[in-house]
Image (tube, helix red, strand yellow):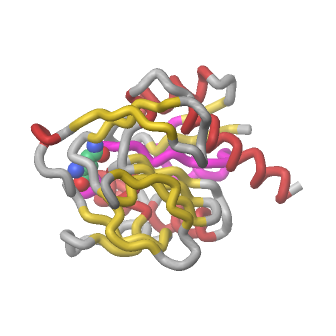
Amino acid sequence: MKIGVLSLQGGVIEHLNHIRNLEADCIEVKEAEDLDEINGIILPGGESTTMGLLLKERGILNPLKQKILNGLPAWGTCAGMILLAKEIENDFRKHLEVMNIKVKRNAYGSQLDSFICHSKVEKVSKEEIPLIFIRAPYIVEVGNDVDVIFEIDGKVVAAREKNMLATSFHPELSTSLEFHKYFLNMCTENLKKLN
Ligand code: GLN
């Protein structure tokens, strides 16, 4: 199994390291052709506007969108979640528009309002996981087919819709591998279905 990490901008290396620590293969996705090699893709944190522009410029946006719509497992962390969303409350831009969620960018305020908390996310792991929020979005509306994975103070910060996972926070910046294990599991399950 091979996992791709979208490598146009943002926090790429931390995701690659976490996936490698779980002994799975991974590659940096920089061109549309890279998509043909992978069994799952991580869209990292960074700046959704910049990543969205680069996705278009490099001709990756549409092929990636089609792959995800055809079932390729995709996990967006923070800006990656914004890329997946069908709607963005406070931005006129839209990017991949594949996941049935409406998100709010920079929902907790500025960089100074970044924070960390520790929680058990029952649907993902029995362990307590550090949740790191950096100029994070949260989900303001979920569609019928979206399963809420975690909420903080009534705000949805992790959700899943079929082959798509979105988290407001950054598991790759903590030492916990639990979310990466969960995503690898999604990819393994999908591969089994295809074979
Ligand atoms: N604020 C960024 C955006 O809107 C996301 C921040 C992040 O990925 N840490 O794209």
**Count of marks placed on residues:** 0
At 68% from the left and 38% from the top, the residue drawn is: 2
- Could you tell me if residue 139 is visible in this image? yes
Residue 9 within the segment the image draws in magenta: no
Residue 48 within the segment the image draws in magenta: yes
Corner quadrant of residue 48: bottom left
Q: Relative to 1, does residue 160 appear above or below in the rendering?
A: below
Which residue ends up furthest to the right in the rendered image? 195
Q: Is residue 41 left or right of residue 154?
A: right
At 32% from the left and 69% from the top, the residue drawn is: 140
- Residue 15 pos. (x, y %): 48, 32
- Could you tell me if residue 47 is visible in this image? no
The range drawn in magenta is 28-49
- Residue 138 pos. (x, y %): 31, 58
Q: Relative to 177, does residue 143 appear above or below in the rendering?
A: below
Q: Is residue 35 left or right of residue 190?
A: left
At 70% from the left and 47% from the top, the residue drawn is: 187
